[in-house]
Image (cartoon, rainbow, N blue to C red):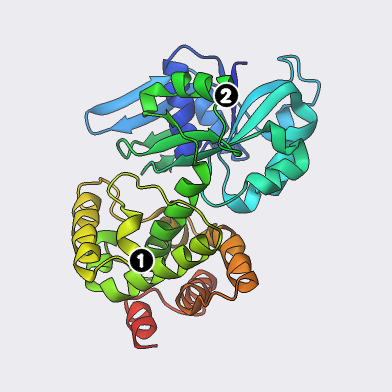
Amino acid sequence: MNYAVVGGGAIGGTIAFHLARGGHRVRLVDADAAHVAAVRERGLVLRRAGGDERAEVDAATPEEVAPDDETGPLTKVLLCVKAQATATAAAWIAPRLAPGGYVVSVQNGLNEPLIAEHVGRERVIGAFVNLFADVVEPGVIRDGGPGAFVIGELDGSASPRVDHLVADLAPLGAKATGNVLGHLWSKLGFGAMLTATALADAPMADLIDRHRPLMHSLVAEVFAVAGRLGLRLEPFDAFEPAAYLPEAPERVREEATDRLTAWLRTQPKDRSGIWRDIAVRHRPVEVHDHYRAVLAEAEAGQVDTPLLRGVLARLADVEAGRAPMGEEHLAALEDA
């Protein structure tokens, strides 16, 4: 197999579809047996406004891929599992990874150090992706339209393997970067706003619009931590991180939020994947893992993050059924 895509959800499924359509041999590995069975039976389906498109993709559950599998060791692995599943997935990959093989973390959050503990830092490549897709039924991914996708070595160097990945993933608009951490931390700022919107059942754009002071302050907390680390934050899609830095004028911040909410209203997916995990799929969200590293860095640098901690605490209550989902959570955070 040219590629192994570990985690066949919204992001992994979309990537596997485009790689297969591009003529690459792809094995999709996913723990959901029903999803795997559907891909085997009907192919991997990408649902678009103009109709369904299918791609033939080899699919398997992790238990079906032995370390000495007849297809050979894994060479190019795109890891697309939820952040909380990273350790388990990396431990599964390690004995199956070929000498010279590598793992690309196509995930939300800062998972590269954890993957490196299992396979070695030199075999890990970072990636940032902002695709608005959803799994709507086994074997079917609803396309969310184009979004930012960048890939880069963790040390910022150029490399042939990144160039090859970018060429193979060109249908998804992939680009090489020398600052993948700047992209990942920028998304953590944007993601703090999306996390807050998951506390209420309303479109992301509307909630960000109605609660701008809270949203701006959440981003500022994350970026204060990034500033302590000396990171250069990168823009993507309609998100402009420079507008949310402390030195940015309020007018610039408001105008940037105008553009961001206008862009979000053009997306077919109007609620976050976090909201969907709670309200539709009834499964644990991954954002607690995303922000664990942020909060640890904040504590080490004595950076206050009361709003981010408050959002995560309220989200945990909503997840567990201790509190109902509702916009009153955002109002209470603003009052606080």
> Where is residue 257 shown, x and y percent of the image?
24, 61
Q: Residue furthest top?
A: 23
Circle 2 sits in a helix, a strand or a loop, which is it? loop
Nearest to the observer: residue 77 or residue 233:
233
Q: Residue at x 19, y 67 (%)?
A: 251
* Residue 3 against residue 139 in the figure, above or below: above
Residue assigned mark 1: 197
Tell me if 263 is positioned left or right of 97 in this view: left
Q: Where is the N terminus found, in terms of image quarters?
A: top right
Residue 243 versus residue 173 in the image, above or below: below
- Camera-nearest residue between 63 and 114: 114
Q: Which residue is mark 2?
A: 159
The answer, for residue 22, to whether it is visible in the render is: yes
Q: Disc 1 and disc 2: Cα gap in Å?
A: 38 Å
Picture quadrant of residue 55 = top left
Q: Is residue 66 left or right of residue 173?
A: right
Q: Residue 184 in the image: state x and y as whole percent.
A: 49, 49
**Figure check: 324 above or below 28:** below
